Image (cartoon, rainbow, N blue to C red):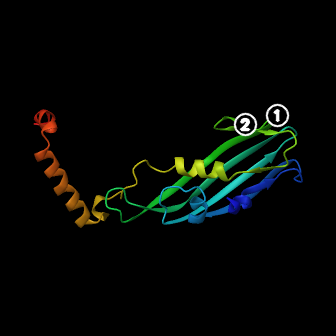
Amino acid sequence: MNDLKQYDIVFTGLKLGEHQFDYQVDETFFNEYLAEKINKASVDVQLQLDKRENMLELEISAQGKMTFPCDRCLDDNEIDVAVSKEKIYVKFGEEEQELAEDLIILRNDDYKINIADTLYELIMVSLPMKKVHQNSDDCNSEVVEKINIEEQKNEETDPRWAALNKLKK
């Protein structure tokens, strides 16, 4: 995870007030997490850090596109990414911990925060559970046809489904 050092924010040298950070996240970022297969990604991330006397407030937004294999046909499927103004509060204490999804506690002697994990979570949570083509006509018709044929064979040959199939009719 050495490539994630670029997501370190050294806050000790920053003046009190607001600071803007911009990141371009691509598929190499997600490959660091051994995430599901991501063929391509281009996500612009804007982070506004508000440094205060005793805490940091991060406001993160992101927009872009990611390309995954379609869950139905395995062809490339481009999905829009949109994270809008998620706030994360960073406070200081005796030990580092994450108390809630929007509250992080850093040690009193910490001088930086790495936001890579936070960005990964926010982006991945914004994606749909099923990554299928929005328009089913965009799916690979040959694969969809083979899936339908196999489903019909399974319905016809598996006696366990007979009672349920009666309910459908």
Q: Position of residue 38 (x, y in %)?
A: 49, 62
> What secondary structure is marked by label 2?
strand
Badge 2 vs badge 1, beta-carbon distance below 8 Å: yes
- Pointer 1 local density, CA inside 10 Å: few below 14, some 14–19, many at least 20: few
Callout 1, which amino acid?
Gly
Seen from the viewer's position, the closer of residues 165 and 25 is: 165
Q: Position of residue 112 (x, y in %)?
A: 81, 50
Rendered residue at 48%/56% (across/down): 36
> Total marks drawn?
2
For disc 2, the marked residue is 97
Left or right, 62 with respect to 88, comes to left
Q: Position of residue 31 (x, y in %)?
A: 57, 61
Left or right, 78 with respect to 143, comes to right
- Pointer 2 local density, CA inside 10 Å: few below 14, some 14–19, many at least 20: some
**Label ID, residue 32:** none
Left or right, 119 with respect to 146, comes to right
Q: Position of residue 86 (x, y in %)?
A: 63, 45
Q: CA distance from mark 2 to mark 1?
A: 9 Å
Seen from the viewer's position, the closer of residues 75 and 19 is: 75
Rendered residue at 83%/33% (across/down): 94
Vertical side of 163 occupied by 38: above or below = below
Image quadrant in which the C terminus is located: top left
Image quadrant in which the N terminus is located: bottom right
For disc 1, the marked residue is 93
Vertical side of 48 occupied by 39: above or below = below
Rendered residue at 37%/59% (across/down): 70
Left or right, 118 with respect to 92, comes to left
Callout 2, which amino acid?
Gln
> What secondary structure is marked by label 1?
strand
